[in-house]
Image (cartoon, grey):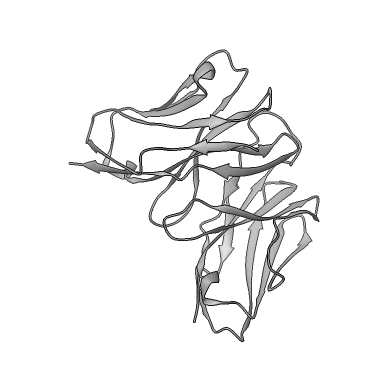
Amino acid sequence: DTEVTQTPKHLVMGMTNKKSLKCEQHMGHRAMYWYKQKAKKPPELMFVYSYEKLSINESVPSRFSPECPNSSLLNLHLHALQPEDSALYLCASSLSVGLAGVNEQFFGPGTRLTVL
Amino acid sequence: AQKITQTQPGMFVQEKEAVTLDCTYDTSDPSYGLFWYKQPSSGEMIFLIYQGSYDQQNATEGRYSLNFQKARKSANLVISASQLGDSAMYFCAMPMDTGRRALTFGSGTRLQVQP
């Protein structure tokens, strides 16, 4: 199974809502990532988890709260978002964070988030 | 810090012809790798090809090949025999630094294949 799944595919939420994005992989990968992609821009890194521990937070506002309950699951909890947070949120996984060589990242299909 | 530059915002190519998408990079790391990803309108990032800085030969994967010129710090993607399904955004990327594998991306090139 060489697939990263993300749910939901689309999400519309108000600025006072609390919602969560979910990401799952069953490839035995121990590194998982959240990226944010605005329209017509490249993805930008938000968080990196390595062996279920948060290893990188790219100065993301606290209204985004990541969680890695186990090695296969990655969540992104959303609270009090702003309209400018509307974007495609991509989850990715790779074998590890420290390996040299290919170690390509496998991406999920993304969640298109709209904040009203 | 790593920097990736893609200077072609958009490209057109006729079906069955070859096309080259440009990518230049800047890094102070002695060992590094370069990735190309395809992003259709559906949003998913699809891994296409990888080139390691110490690889002796240019990488090839089916219709995709890399024209890697280390001295010029360029890693151009060549797509041969273009197909309509190749229409998508293409991103060149490399790991942010040797300690972490998160990727930094170029600005992307939108390729449109015309029948």
Task: Locate residue A43, reporting x and y percent.
Answer: 54, 52
Residue at left offset 58%, top offset 83%: A15
Residue that protrudes farthest toward the bottom in the picture = A16
Of B28 and B92, nearer the camera is B28
Task: Locate residue A61, reporting x and y percent.
Answer: 68, 68
Residue B99 appears in the figure: yes
Residue at left offset 45%, top offset 32%: B23
Task: Locate residue B85, reporting x and y percent.
Answer: 31, 44
Image-quadrant location for residue A14: bottom right
Residue at left offset 61%, top offset 86%: A16
Residue A84 placement, left or right of B67: right
Q: How many marks?
A: 0
Residue A92 placement, left or right of A9: right
Quadrant into which the C terminus of chain B falls: top left
Residue at left offset 55%, top offset 70%: A85
Residue A2 appears in the figure: no
Q: Up-down: is A86 above or below B100?
A: below
Quadrant into which the N terminus of chain B falls: top right
Residue that protrudes farthest toward the left in the picture = B115
Task: Locate residue B51, reporting x and y percent.
Answer: 55, 26
Image-quadrant location for residue B81: top left
